[in-house]
Image (cartoon, rainbow, N blue to C red):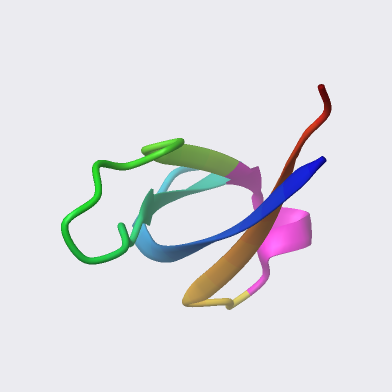
Amino acid sequence: MSETKIKFELEKENKNSVRYKEIPKDGMPPILGTIYVQKWYAGNSKYLEVTVTKVD
């Protein structure tokens, strides 16, 4: 198994969700790109970190 932590920053707020854009590591393309998180969970967070685990 391989684990990667991906950082996101606030891009836009919608009615019920918040859009975050990925902060890619130096010289690397984005892994997930953009994610949407429900407002009830995101709250006022400007940044999120998501852990992705590859299961072989």
* Whether residue 44 is situated above or below residue 27 in the rendered picture: below
7 left or right, relative to 44: left
* Whether residue 35 is situated above or below residue 6 in the rendered picture: above
* Whether residue 45 is situated above or below residue 34 in the rendered picture: below
The one nearer the camera, 17 or 23, is 23
* Whether residue 55 is situated above or below residue 28 in the rendered picture: above
Check residue 49 for magenta coloring: no
The residue sitting at 50% across, 74% down in the picture is: 47
The one nearer the camera, 17 or 35, is 35
The one nearer the camera, 53 or 46, is 53
| Residue stretch rendered in magenta on the structure | 37-43
Could you say which quadrant of the image residue 14 lies in? top left
Q: Position of residue 52 (x, y in %)?
A: 70, 45
20 left or right, relative to 28: right
The residue sitting at 83% across, 28% down in the picture is: 55
Q: Position of residue 49 (x, y in %)?
A: 61, 66
Q: Position of residue 48 (x, y in %)?
A: 58, 68
Q: Position of residue 31 (x, y in %)?
A: 42, 38
Name the quadrant of the N terminus.
Answer: top right
Could you say which quadrant of the image residue 23 lies in? bottom left
The residue sitting at 21% across, 66% down in the picture is: 26
Name the quadrant of the C terminus.
Answer: top right
The residue sitting at 47% across, 77% down in the picture is: 46
The one nearer the camera, 55 or 16, is 55
